[in-house]
Amino acid sequence: MSSGSLTERLIAEITENPELADKLKKLIENVTLTEISRELKIYRQDIQRLSEEQTRLAQEQVKLREDFQKLSEEQTRLAQEQVKLREDFNKLYQEQVKLREDFQKLSEEQTRLAQEQVKLREDFQKLSEEQTRLAQEQVKLREDFNKLLNEVKELKLSYKRLDKKVDRMFGAMLKGFTDLSQFAGMTFEEFVRRFLENYLKDMKILPKDKSLTSTIIEGEEIDVFSEDPPIIGEVTSFTQSTDEINKILRKAEVFRRKYGKEPAKYLIIMTTRKKTYRELEEMAKKWNINLIVGKISG
């Protein structure tokens, strides 16, 4: 049976039976109201969900706006940092350029120092060779100096021997001329003064226009005297003690007090004993006194 026939039959039944039509109408109305109520409930639930969703979306939108604001601020901050990074990068780049220049300078300086080091090594080598040469020369100079020192020692010994010979010769001459002075009407002191004066002039100690005299200073009688050059002398014909040394030292002291100068000291003795002579000679060396003895007896 077709659906069209079923529908036609149903319409025919409803037309023929009004009560059935009323029941059917009520049934349809009830079904429709229930369905509508159910649909409305569903709609309300959907609207509630939509409202909640809308509220949630609104909250999320607010949150998104806040996040967007934060993101915008972060983006602004990042942009500023990017600018700063760019500046820092530029500074770093400039610093890198400067470092490269400094490195280049350092490399050149290192090369120069290496060259100087080579030159210094060469100079050091030359200096070492020069030092070796100087050391060798120093050894030779030391040898020459030792030879010269030995020669000086020999000369000193020769001079001492010669000085003793001169002293002996001077003493012998003094003795001989003293004997002659007795026939010339001169005292021994006068003769010694003239004899010593000529001797000192020959030795360029006493100028040609100067003379030796005698004088008295502070009660001390000085047999041989010269103020300029400063000279004093003690003359005696005989002694057997060292008192004459003390006399001339005392007279030298009064000379220094008066003239403020240190005089050359001469002790002239005509005759003394051998033992006394040795003592006089030792003291004369100690006090820098020129000792002249004419005759040494046993």
Image (tube, helix red, strand yellow):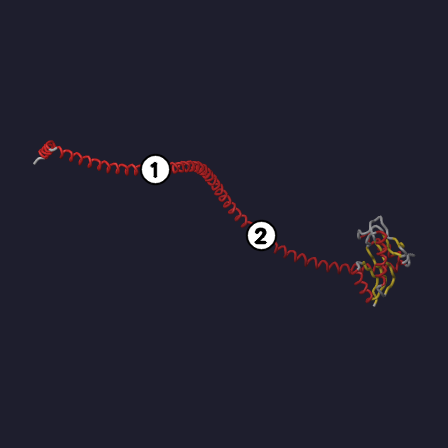
Where residue 191 sits: x, y (%)?
A: 88, 56
Q: Quadrant of residue 262?
A: bottom right
Where residue 106 sits: x, y (%)?
A: 49, 43
Q: Is residue 258 above or below residue 298?
A: above
Tell me the SS state at disc 2.
Answer: helix
* Crowd class of label 1 (few under 14; some 14 to 19; many from 20; radius 10 Å): few
Q: CA distance from mark 1 to mark 2?
A: 104 Å
Pointer 1 or 2: first along the chain: 1
- Given residues 277 and 120, the one toward you in this image is 120
From the image, tell me which residue sits under label 2: 131
- Given residues 12 and 295, the one toward you in this image is 12
From the image, tell me which residue sits under label 1: 55
Residue extending farthest top: 15
Q: Amino acid at mark 2?
A: Gln
Is 207 situated left or right of 124 in this image?
Answer: right
Tell me the SS state at disc 1.
Answer: helix
* Crowd class of label 2 (few under 14; some 14 to 19; many from 20; radius 10 Å): some
Q: Nearer the viewer, mark 1 or mark 2?
A: 1
Tell me the quadrant of the picture where the N terminus can be found. top left
Q: Amino acid at mark 1?
A: Thr
Q: Residue at x 24, y 37 (%)?
A: 37
Where residue 100 sits: x, y (%)?
A: 46, 40
Is the Cβ of the residue at disc 1 closer than 8 Å to that at disc 2?
A: no
Where residue 79 sits: x, y (%)?
A: 42, 36
